[in-house]
Image: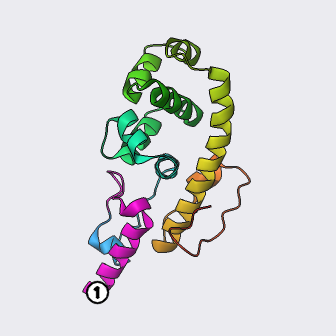
Amino acid sequence: MLKLFYVLTFALLSAAPGGAQPPAGNEVSAKTAAGVGEAAPRLTGEDLFARAFVLDHSTTALYAVFESTNPGHTAASYLRRGVYRREFLVLFSIARDSRTAFKVLVEEREKGGTLQAIAKKYKADLMKLFRESEALQKEVEAGAAKLETAAASAAPGISSAPVRQAVPGAAVKPSTSTNERN
């Protein structure tokens, strides 16, 4: 039984990108890992999107923009608190290019600042960022679907509903490797 626990724990941790810990609130009990008792935790669409986003960006840029040593958790927290995905991608680009902390831009938005005003203030071409973020959003959502599939195969019971709802018509194919990336 203990051996099964270690194998399942290893499988769950290896399913997370870079062996990262699951975001806070998604802890797995020993009973759940062993397949006994309560259902496995559900990864939200925001968690999956944040994880896929982090995988597509350099660690240096992520640390600088989010001012955090856990950018995946930080990104997911902004998405969970109401920052839309496209808005998130645009604000990240502005923050990265202007070397401004992401939280500063989010605070400006929360105070009623428009994306247009923020882009102008930080000398960014908003229309260009919208076009780039559209393609990037599709790419990140496809990556999130792969992560969700990998997590579901490593830990049965995790729902794929959030990803399917986020990407209508997206076909989710089972992955043969938890580290598969295209």
What residue is at 66 percent from the left and 63 percent from the top?
Answer: 172
39 over 170 or under it: above or below: below
Residue extending furthest left? 2
Q: Is residue 24 left or right of residue 118?
A: left
Q: In x, y percent, where is residue 88? A: 52, 33
Other residues around mark 1 within 10 Å, as few (<14) / some (14–19) / many (≥20): few
Count every numbered label the image shows and give the total.
Answer: 1
Amino acid tagged 1: Lys
What residue is at 59 percent from the left and 58 percent from the top?
Answer: 145
Q: Nearer the viewer, residue 138 or 153?
A: 138
Q: How is the image coloured?
A: rainbow
Q: Nearer the viewer, residue 180 or 44?
A: 180
* Quarter of the image where one finds residue 107: top left
What residue is at 54 percent from the left and 61 percent from the top?
Answer: 148
Locate the N terminus and report the quarter of the image it occupies. bottom left
Q: Is residue 157 left or right of residue 175?
A: left
Q: According to the image, label 1 marks what residue?
A: 3
Task: Look at the image and give the residue range highlighted in magenta.
Answer: 1-27
* Quarter of the image where one finds residue 149: bottom right
Q: Is residue 44 visible?
A: yes
Q: In x, y percent, where is residue 138? A: 66, 46
Q: Is residue 93 left or right of residue 59?
A: right
Locate the C terminus and report the quarter of the image it occupies. bottom right
